Amino acid sequence: MPGEDAPDRFELRHVGDVEWLIHDHSYSHDDARHVVAHLAPTDGDVVEVTWLQTTALPTQYATPRDVIDDLIRWKARTARGTRPIPIPHFPPFPGDRLSERTPQMHAEFTPSRR
């Protein structure tokens, strides 16, 4: 089975006379994610795509090859990680009563050992 970044990861396979399926070979044949999309021509010489996975890609293309090319580009972009988003840290507010009571509260709720 090809890896995630292999050039032959996706396969455009004919089903019927004019319809196609896109298979993702990074998943086994019995995995539901193996079939990515169903393609069918429309009256206006456009290919209508029914995505079977969640994507941000269009549902109409000029040719089936355009669908595969766009899918490969999209997967390459989304596969890369991003830098972590920094979480701002702030010091306690001056005069914060909770920070002043913390040692007392800790002593009150700590069980004594006998």
Image: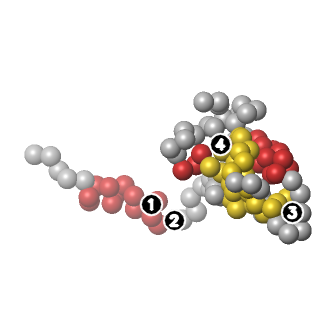
Cα separation between marks 1 and 4: 59 Å
| Pointer 4 with pointer 3, Cβ within 8 A | no
Q: Looking at the rendered structure, which numbered label has been put on residue 96?
A: 2
Q: Secondary structure at mark 4?
A: strand
- Residue 102 horizontal side relative to residue 43, left or right: left
Instruction: Give the vertical position of 65 relative to 19 (above or below).
Output: above
Structural distance between the alpha carbons of marks 1 and 2: 7 Å
Who comes first in sequence, dot 4 or dot 3? 4
The numbered dot on residue 88 is none
Picture disc at residue 46: 3
Q: Nearer the viewer, mark 4 or mark 3?
A: 3
Inspect the image, locate mark 4, and give the three-letter code of the amino acid beneath it: Asp
Check disc 2 and give the amino acid type: Asp
SS for tag 2?
A: loop
Horizontal and vertical percent position of residue 72 = 78, 43
As shown in the figure, which amino acid type bears the numbered disc 3?
Val
Sequence-first tag of 1 and 4: 4
Marks 2 and 3, the one that precedes in the sequence: 3
Q: Residue at x 10, y 46 (%)?
A: 114
Within 10 angstroms of label 1, few (less than 14), some, or many (20 or more) residues? few
Tally the numbered discs.
4
Write down the residue under mark 1.
100
Which of pointers 1 and 4 indicates the residue nearer the eye?
Answer: 4
Q: Residue furthest front?
A: 17
